[in-house]
Image (tube, rainbow, N blue to C red):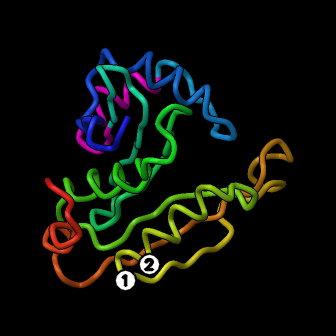
Amino acid sequence: MSKHDVVLRHPVLEDGTAVFDLVDACKPLDLNSHYLYLLQCSHFAPTCVVATLSSEVVAWVSGYIPPKQADTFFVWQVAVGEKARGLGLGKRLLNWVVAQQSGIAKIHTSITPDNAASWGLFKSLARDWGSHLSSRDWFEEQSHFGGRHNTEVLVEITLPTSPLATFLQTQGVQQ
C-alpha cells in the first residue's frame, strides 16, 4: 500500500459507523457518541475529511469553524488506523481539509500533554507552514473535568499571511 492508493474526500452520512469504529480503535482518542459521528459526517461534512483505501475508511479528520471566529478552523479529531500509519496521512488530511476552507487565519486544536503523536503532528505542520505554534492550558483537569480527564491544552497555529490555498498549492496540496 502506498499513499497514492488512498483517496481523500469529504465524508457522507454512510461513513458515520466506520468513523466511529476507527476512532474507537485509535487510542488515546476520546470516543464520542455514534450519533455525533453521524452528525459530523452529514452536518459538518464540509469541514471534515476521510481517507479511504479500497473503499474502507482508514483515516479521519474532523473540524469546524467556531461560532464568532470565522477566521479559525478548529481541528476536533485526527485518527489514522493501524494499517494506514506511516504514510503521512494525518498531515495530508489536515492540509487537504484546511485548503478547503476560505478566510482561515489560524488553526486551533486541543491536545492532552501526554499525546506525543498529536504534539508531533501539529509541531510538524507549523514547521512545514513556516508558522508560529503557541499553546496554553484550556480545559483544566480539576476545574473543568472534575478530575475525570487530563487537561486539554489549546494549540494555535497562525497561518502564513499569503492566502492559505496558494500556500498549500506550493506545498503540493490539491483542493
In the image, what residue type sits under mark 2? Arg
Q: Residue at x 58, y 64 (%)?
A: 120
Q: Position of residue 40 (x, y in %)?
A: 37, 31
Mark identifier at residue 130: 1
Label 2: how many residues lie within 10 Å, few (<14), some (14-19) or many (20+)? few
Mark identifier at residue 127: 2
Q: Name the one closer to the observer, 152 or 28.
A: 28
In the image, what residue type sits under mark 1? Gly
Q: Residue at x 40, y 66 (%)?
A: 107
Badge 1 element = loop
Q: Quadrant of the N terminus?
A: top left
Q: Residue at x 48, y 70 (%)?
A: 124
- Secondary structure mostly seen in magenta is helix
96 over 70 or under it: above or below: above
Q: Name the one closer to the observer, 73 or 175.
A: 175
Q: Position of residue 85 (x, y in %)?
A: 51, 42
Q: Name the one closer to the observer, 77 or 124.
A: 124
Residue range corresponding to the magenta coloring: 36-49
Q: Residue at x 22, y 59 (%)?
A: 99
* For the residues bearing labels 2 and 1, Cβ distance under 8 angstroms: yes
